[in-house]
């Protein structure tokens, strides 16, 4: 059984994950290789499949949750920059954007389209001083975190007092019909679109993994508990369309 099932892992023990890796060390290596390989095709695949629900949604989440002109934001798991690009336009020229990701391939793709300070690192060990940023965002990557307690402790540490964390993530729909629709989308619609357009070759494995981790991800209540355990206050979660979740918290 993969050792993603440390008590604080963002993924539960799930037999499907065995086909990808055997333990935590292998999980990091395997997923990093997937992300490096998928970097060039990621934006196109994301537009085609809307698994992160698009740039309008990402921007709206940041804006609604208090990202403003002049702020310093750390975008964790920045990938190719789909959250970062929206953040940059909201903070404007007086703001400061830092983008963190462990995948050099993703960071290279991001740097090719956005003027940004990049940090090659994991969420669990952020190489920044205490009380350094006003806002932390993380888009569609929490399930890749091996230890949410370590990550959330780091988020609290680098945020300034009063700073906010905003985590966007897809969760498993509650209703049977919602679950069937999501399975149909990932298992049938996405591969069909991929064949039709001849795209997704580089991201195929990543998208399959994505589908499997939606079922294996820990429940939203455990994510909220983790934020509270770390010391965040005003912790809450809102849901759009039954699947797109925003986990929020404030550093006291
Ligand atoms: C699905 S992409 C999300 C990219 C972007 N945030 C978005 O909204 O599309 C997930 C990213 O998480 C990164 N990642 C994986 N494990 C991570 C970790 N433990 N800490 C920080 N980032 C991680 C990957 O390298 C990848 O670029």
Image (spheres, helix red, strand yellow):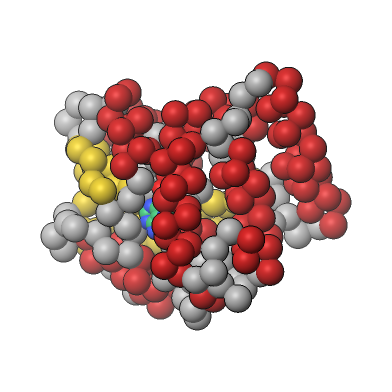
Give the residue displayed 26% in from the left and 48% down from the top. 120
Residue 166 seen by the camera = no
Q: In screen coordinates, is 251 left or right of 217? A: left
Q: In screen coordinates, is 181 left or right of 19? A: right
Locate residue 122: give its quadrant. Answer: bottom left
Give the residue displayed 56% in from the left and 44% down from the top. 206
Quadrant assignment for the N terminus: bottom right
Give the residue furthest to the bottom. 7
Give the residue furthest to the left. 129
**Pick the front one: 75 or 200:** 200
Locate residue 114: give its quadrant. Answer: top left
Residue 7 seen by the camera = yes
Q: In screen coordinates, is 142 left or right of 20? A: left
Relative image position of residue 73 (x, y in whole percent):
27, 44
Give the residue displayed 31% in from the left and 42% down from the top. 104
Give the residue furthest to the right. 177
Give the residue displayed 61% in from the left and 38% down from the top. 204
Relative image position of residue 128 (x, y in whole percent):
17, 57
**Pick the front one: 67 or 43:** 43
Locate residue 126: give its quadrant. Answer: bottom left
Residue 182, relative to residue 231: is it above or below? above
Relative image position of residue 188 (x, y in whole percent):
79, 37
Quadrant assignment for the C terminus: bottom left
Residue 68, relative to residue 245: is it above or below? above
Relative image position of residue 176 (x, y in whole percent):
85, 57
Q: How many numbered discs?
A: 0
Residue 155, relative to residue 204: is it above or below? below
**Pick the front one: 97 or 143:** 143
Residue 207, relative to residue 197: is it above or below? below
Q: In screen coordinates, is 90 left or right of 192? A: left
């Amino acid at each position: 059984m993969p050792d993603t099932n440390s008590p604080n892992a963002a993924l539960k023990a799930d037999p499907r994950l065995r086909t990808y890796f055997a333990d935590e060390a292998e999980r990091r290596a395997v997923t990093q290789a997937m992300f490096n390989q998928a970097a060039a095709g990621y934006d196109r695949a994301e537009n085609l499949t809307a698994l992160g629900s698009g740039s309008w949604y990402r921007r709206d989440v940041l804006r609604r949750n208090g990202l403003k002109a002049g702020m310093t934001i750390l975008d964790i798991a920045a990938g190719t920059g789909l959250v970062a690009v929206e953040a940059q336009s909201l903070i404007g020229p007086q703001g400061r954007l830092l983008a963190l990701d462990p995948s050099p391939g993703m960071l290279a793709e991001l740097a090719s389209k956005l003027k940004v300070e990049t940090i090659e690192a994991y969420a669990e060990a952020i190489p920044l001083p205490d009380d350094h940023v006003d806002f932390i965002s993380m888009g569609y990557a929490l399930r890749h975190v091996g230890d949410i307690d370590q990550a959330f402790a780091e988020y609290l540490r680098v945020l300034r007092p009063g700073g906010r964390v905003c985590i966007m993530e897809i969760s498993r729909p509650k209703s049977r019909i919602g679950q069937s629709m999501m399975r149909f989308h990932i298992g049938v619609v996405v591969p069909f679109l991929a064949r039709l357009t001849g795209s997704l070759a580089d991201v195929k494995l990543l998208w399959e993994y994505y589908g499997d981790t939606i079922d294996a991800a820990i429940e939203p209540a455990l994510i909220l508990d983790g934020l509270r355990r770390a010391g965040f206050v005003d912790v809450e979660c809102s849901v759009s369309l039954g699947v797109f979740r925003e986990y929020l918290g404030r550093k006291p």
